[in-house]
Image (cartoon, helix red, strand yellow):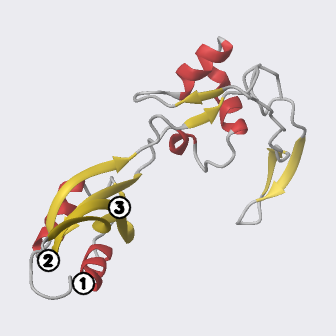
Amino acid sequence: MFSKNSRYKKLSDTVTNDARGRRLGSKTLRVVPDVAGTFRYAVEEGDRLDHLAYKAYKDSTRWWRICDANPEFMSPQAMLGKEPMVTISIRVTFPGEGDPPWCDLIRSLSALVGIEDVRIADDIRLVEREMEYEGDTVTYTGERAARSVAVVFNRMNLDKRAIVHEVRALGFNTGESYTVSRVGKKIVLPPDVTG
């Protein structure tokens, strides 16, 4: 039933009941082993777990060792940034009069099928400014705020263009946007120990 190097092969057999009450043969629960690793790998664009496993262990089927060493990720795809959920950040400005309609923006985006979360992020930076004071030019440090909309969405239902279109439809101007990705982030590659 399992290949010779399967992580489930050595588990003992058991009998369980399914939702309909049928008794079925099964394997006992596999407890995630303690995997200690100090080698940290920076995720690159196009990485695949089977390729990483081959580089690390000369066996592409041992990708699950990498998953065991990185339990903070719910799925192997999330570890490499290839899950369907994507986070984008779009710089926005409001050219109209009065306060920007932030509530309308959040409500409108949240109503789109596939959007999981919408947040407004303030990026406040200190910049040097000059002003005339009693005939002298005075340099001072002031705040400059830039706002972005961070949107978490399912790329199977929606794309970035549709989100930008919705933001613009509410009267906002959009600037640079980027996808928050796992590229460059570190994961643990544990030593090759059977477990």
Name the residue that disc number 3 marks.
125
Between the C-alphas of marks 1 and 2, the distance is 8 Å
Name the residue that disc number 2 marks.
170
CB within 8 Å, label 1 to label 2: yes
Q: From the viewer's perspective, is 7 left or right of 55?
A: right
* x and y, in percent, of residue 178 in the image: 29, 49
Q: Amino acid at mark 2?
A: Leu
Q: Amino acid at mark 3?
A: Arg
CB within 8 Å, label 1 to label 3: no
Q: Residue at x 52, y 38 (%)?
A: 185
* x and y, in percent, of residue 129 in the image: 23, 63
Q: Residue at x 16, y 69 (%)?
A: 136
Report if residue 157 is visible in the image: no
Between the C-alphas of marks 1 and 3, the distance is 26 Å
Q: Callout 3: few (<14), some (14-19), or many (20+) C-alpha neighbours within 10 Å? A: few
Image quarter (top left, top right, bottom left or bottom right) of the N terminus: top right
The dot on residue 104 is: 1
Image quarter (top left, top right, bottom left or bottom right) of the C terminus: top right
Q: Residue at x 27, y 81 (%)?
A: 102
- Mark toward the start of the polypeptide (2 vs 3): 3
- Mark toward the start of the polypeptide (1 vs 2): 1
- Please identify the quarter of the rendering in which residue 99 is found: bottom left
